[in-house]
Image (cartoon, rainbow, N blue to C red):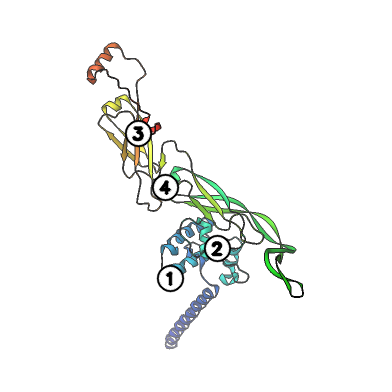
Amino acid sequence: TSQSALTWQPSLLTTMRSLAVVLLLLQLAVVIMAGRDFYKILGVKRTATKKEIKKAYRKLAMEFHPDKNPGNREAEEKFQDIGAAYEVLSDEEKRPIYDKHGEDGLAKGAQRHDAGDIFSSMFGGGFFNMGGQGERQAARGDDIRLDLDVTLEDLYNGAFIEVLHTKGVYREAPGKRKCNCRMEMRTQQLGRGQFQMANVQVCDECNNVKLFKENVEVDLEIEPGMVQGQELKFHGEGEAHTDGEPGDLIFHINTLKHSRFQRAGNHLFTNVTITLRDALTGFNMDIEHLDGHKVHINRQEVTPPNMMIMIPKEGMKSFENNHDRGDLYVTFDVQFPVTKFPADAAEGLVELLGQSSKQSIYNGLEAQFVPK
């Protein structure tokens, strides 16, 4: 009996191993039949929220964008996969179908979008040259242009802003209508041997449409160094058109006034008011910058009114290259005492300063207002 048990045991192990291999092959077959694993592509869990999916997409799309990886076929394919994954997992109707039936469950009647269009709708059209998208010749809706108020902190540090946008969308309705109307030259016979060329309106027949309003969440990325008036363009998010594509939604950067800093190009300007004591004897101070770090100033010399100092590389980051920065210019205003000095204190001050009373009259406005 023990001998037969020894003979049976290896046979059972072999069978169990075979079954395990079969089950593994079946699982692989199911995955292959189901298509790509969109959760794995974005690196998120199946329970990921919409915000987590957006965050993962933003990071990967910027990393694998073709314009950042020219000639890299693998990065281009990865970018397409990332776009397809985001298109499905961010859609409240497509995601449950995908979770139940995989990518094949979406194949019938699914509307595919170009990965570049998905990227533009997420980030706007101002970050990379998408290429190959020449001006549309077909009829299209009007563009919508809006000012986007941002703080100087947003432009220095970068920021993500979510905007709820209401847009019109045409959907099919019962009945037919004339569409795509245009003028064409036609030849008409007036009589025997007589012909005339004339402009004639020609129209196609299309399904009727009805205009609906829908709310769309637009994600805008404010990149460090962006400037006043810079555009963020979202393709197809503008006014709808019955016979063509919708226009674009275009945001213009509008910098809000700041309480401490003024921007000029990539340079920053600020004013500091100091006491007469500080102006004469020197001082130490810190200026809190737009990201919270401290800029230290140490003055051991006399600081006259309206004196300006330059602190290198403490200005704004350059939009083209964040490693390049402008400078910070600080102008000092001197606050003089308003109380009258006693006679003996005034005499002591005159003696300490070692200056005689002297006045000079000159045209101080000439440089600004008088043409040369």
Amino acid carrying mark 2 in the image:
Glu
User: Dot 2 corresponds to which residue?
Assistant: 87
Report the side of 90 relative to 154 (left or right): right
From the image, tell me which residue sits under label 3: 331
The disc, 3 or 4, on the residue closer to the chain's N-terminal end is 4
Q: Residues within 10 Å of mark 4 (few under 14, many from 20)?
A: some
x and y, in percent, of residue 209 in the image: 70, 61
Q: Quadrant of the N terminus?
A: bottom left
Tag 2 or tag 3, which sits nearer the N-term? 2
Tell me if label 1 and label 2 are in contact, CB under 8 Å. no
Q: Is residue 35 visible?
A: yes
Residue at figure coordinates x 41%, y 69% from the top left: 72
Task: Say which element carries label 2.
Answer: helix
Q: Is residue 150 above or below residue 232?
A: above
Sequence order check, earlier mark of 1 and 3: 1
Element type where label 3 sits in the image: strand
Secondary structure type for disc 1? helix
Residue beneath label 1, please? 73
